[in-house]
């Protein structure tokens, strides 16, 4: 009896209360040579919707991991990365701001580096629909603060499209403290400190609105980053 080949890629999609956006996201995925791990930790019907999609889309390897409590953006990504089975892993926001085609480009970049992150703020990036001026200013201010705090020189740590070699992720994941939206910054910082190479790749991106990052989340991000930088351990 033959067994299915191991997936080429593992793509994690954190999906907190995303039942209305997860359907068009999967409709945009016409093919994918890997497994798609959807993390459902909300109270709506996202998990049921994903299960229905998995049943109807036999051309895709879709796994739904459901939790009865909020994991946070970072916590959801961590849960997905831990369950990933392929040598190349990544994660993508459920809002569809970045296409699966762009995610594939990031995976291909891993032939010459340990990690590749999509960037909206470097030459070559295409912003089909921009954020509001206020959101752009907030993003630039946040980037300046993390450069000062962590000394990492990336222009865009928060774009929701990233890919890495699983070996690099496995090396730093046990040290991770963050579970919120600040997760991306800590991950890149720990990879840099461990000697791994992560490059920024210009990406095609469009603002989809209905951002999950609210004002209170931004305050939580700053607090979480200070906790990480001060070296406190999560209990």
Image (spheres, rainbow, N blue to C red):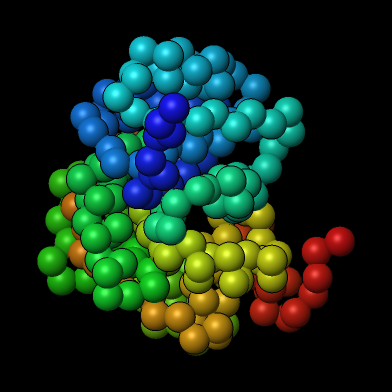
Q: Is residue 221 visible?
A: yes
How many callouts does the rendering have? Answer: 0
Say which of 140 and 22 sits in front. Answer: 22
Figure quadrant of residue 221: bottom right
Say which of 178 and 1 sits in front. Answer: 1
Residue at point 59%, 72% (across, down): 171
* Image location (x, y in percent) of residue 126: 15, 56
Residue at point 22%, 71% (across, down): 122
* Image location (x, y in percent) of residue 23: 36, 21
Q: Is residue 174 left or right of residue 95?
A: right
Q: Is residue 30 left or right of residue 4?
A: left
Q: What quarter of the picture does the N terminus occupy?
A: top left
Residue at point 15%, 71% (across, down): 123
Q: What quarter of the picture does the C terminus occupy?
A: bottom right
Residue at point 60%, 32% (across, down): 65
Say which of 50 and 222 sits in front. Answer: 50
Work out which residue is located at the far right of the displayed protein and give it. 235
Figure quadrant of residue 183: bottom right
Q: Is residue 136 visible?
A: no
* Image location (x, y in percent) of residue 48: 54, 15
Asked if residue 13 is positioned above or below residue 65 in the image, the reply reads: below
Say which of 44 and 138 sits in front. Answer: 44
């Amino acid at each position: 009896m033959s067994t299915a080949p191991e997936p080429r890629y593992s793509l994690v999609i954190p999906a907190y209360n995303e039942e209305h956006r997860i359907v068009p996201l999967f409709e945009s995925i016409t093919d994918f040579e890997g497994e798609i791990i959807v993390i459902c930790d909300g109270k709506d019907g996202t998990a049921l919707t994903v299960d229905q999609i998995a049943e109807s889309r036999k051309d895709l390897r879709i796994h739904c991991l459901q939790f009865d409590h909020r994991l946070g953006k970072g916590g959801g990504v961590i849960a997905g990365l831990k369950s990933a089975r392929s040598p190349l892993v990544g994660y993508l926001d459920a809002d569809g701001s970045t296409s699966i085609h762009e995610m594939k480009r990031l995976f291909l970049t891993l032939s010459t580096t340990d990690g590749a992150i999509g960037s909206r703020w470097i030459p070559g990036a295409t912003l089909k629909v921009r954020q509001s001026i206020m959101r752009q200013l907030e993003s630039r201010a946040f980037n300046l603060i993390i450069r000062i705090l962590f000394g990492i020189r990336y222009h865009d740590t928060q774009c929701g499209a990233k890919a890495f070699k699983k070996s690099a992720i496995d090396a730093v994941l046990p040290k991770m403290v963050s579970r919120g939206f600040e997760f991306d910054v800590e991950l890149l910082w720990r990879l840099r400190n461990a000697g791994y190479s992560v490059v920024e790749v210009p990406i095609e991106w469009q603002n989809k609105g209905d951002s999950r990052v609210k004002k209170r989340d931004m305050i939580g991000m700053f607090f979480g980053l200070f906790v990480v930088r001060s070296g406190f351990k999560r209990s």
